[in-house]
Amino acid sequence: MTRIYAVAYHQSKFGKLYDKTLEQMLHEAASGVLDRAGAEADVVDAVGLAGCCAPALNQQLLLSGLLADAPGFAGKQIHTAENACASGGQAILDVVMRLKAGLADVGLAIGVEKMRNDQGKMDGKVIGQVLGTASHPDQRPGKVFVFPHLFAEIMKLYIDTHGSSEEELAHVPVLEYANANRNPLAQMHKVEVGLDDVMRIEGVNRYIVDGLPLKTYDSSQITDGYAALLLCNEDGLRKLSVAPDQVVEIAGYSQRTDPLNTSIRDDILRPRGAYAAVASAYKMAGIDMTNVSLAEVHDCFSVMGAMSAEIIGKAEYGQGGRYFAEGEAAVDGACPINTSGGLIAKGHPIGATGVAMVGWAYSQILGEVPEALQVADIDHAVTFNIGGPICASAVFVLRGNN
């Protein structure tokens, strides 16, 4: 089979990009990752592009055309991907498929999102409505903030089903904020949050929906940011002047989709498509969960961090919260999870999130993250990116080019 490699990664700092335009962000993403690879735009055959909220928040369609305005990108294959919060993962998959098919030798995956205005402020109600369009229409009435409401219901179901607790799940954001404090590119880089902060209802921390357990610190950020990953097949590798020790293999990948309407599902705590995507990616890579020594997962809310540990096979069903509470997900734990800070503290620029997950795993394998976050002796890394209420799932398995 044709082998696929990641050869360079570049991202902005996540958080507030103020008056930087989408066009500037796209151009900086492309030029930045090419600079890291020591390459020029003419070597890129195809681009996968994700910017999920741009039509609604920025009144901008045709992001591909904005990228084509950049020097060297006119006339290229540039295609956009939309799979809600899994759009970044979908953009990578689209590039990988073109590389596998021989339609391109060198590909570029870019994720971008500008969710705040030029003063760095955001309209939470508008953003809630925009993101809510990735839910089933029947589940929107009566919910101003659709996804926090849906995941608050999932969080309550998780607690009631597994005998977990708000305090146990609070260890997810506590770990994420601690990691973000060591990641200078993270949105919450200088924000310290402890267990008491997550549990105490005061100041910025409040229950999002009355009567349900989800709190502010259990939730991901509203974020500007971009991320870019340069990929190639074996022919593309020969075209690029990249040192062998800068190459990471994309050894496995998969995508699956569960029903959008959670009310008709009996598997919301054990989503069949998500589990199938992980199993398929592991099979392609020729591994099982015992080979995975690093993970970046989609902790849009703390309960999803716990569930993700289960979905990737690192915690038994119903034990994901305990996995975090017992320190197994820490940098020095059994399998470190979200050493970047995750969506809760690194930030969640929707279209860029899936690309940033793979980019961080790539950087970890190459030993390029801050020393305090560096995981030693990585066998394989897995990324798990979701869209909607655990609907679309994109999974990647990475390993060093040994």
Image: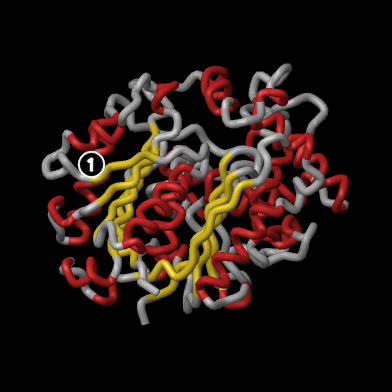
Residue 327 sits in quarter: bottom right
Q: What is the number of callouts on the image?
A: 1
**Crowding at label 1, few (<14), some or many (≥20) Cα neighbours within 10 Å?**
many
Task: Look at the image and tell me in which quarter the C terminus lies.
Answer: bottom left
Q: Residue 164, image x and y in percent?
A: 83, 51
Q: Residue furthest bottom?
A: 402
In the picture shown, does residue 291 fall above or below 330? below
- Tell me the residue at 64%/60% (across/down): 276
Task: Look at the image and tell me in which quarter the N terminus lies.
Answer: bottom left
Q: Secondary structure at mark 1?
A: helix
Say which residue label 1 marks: 28
Relative horizontal placement of residue 178, taking residue 68 as reference (left or right): right
In terms of depth relative to the viewer, which is nearer, 114 or 50? 50
Residue 214 visible in the shown view: no
Q: Residue 40, image x and y in percent?
A: 13, 54
In terms of depth relative to the viewer, which is nearer, 397 or 187? 397
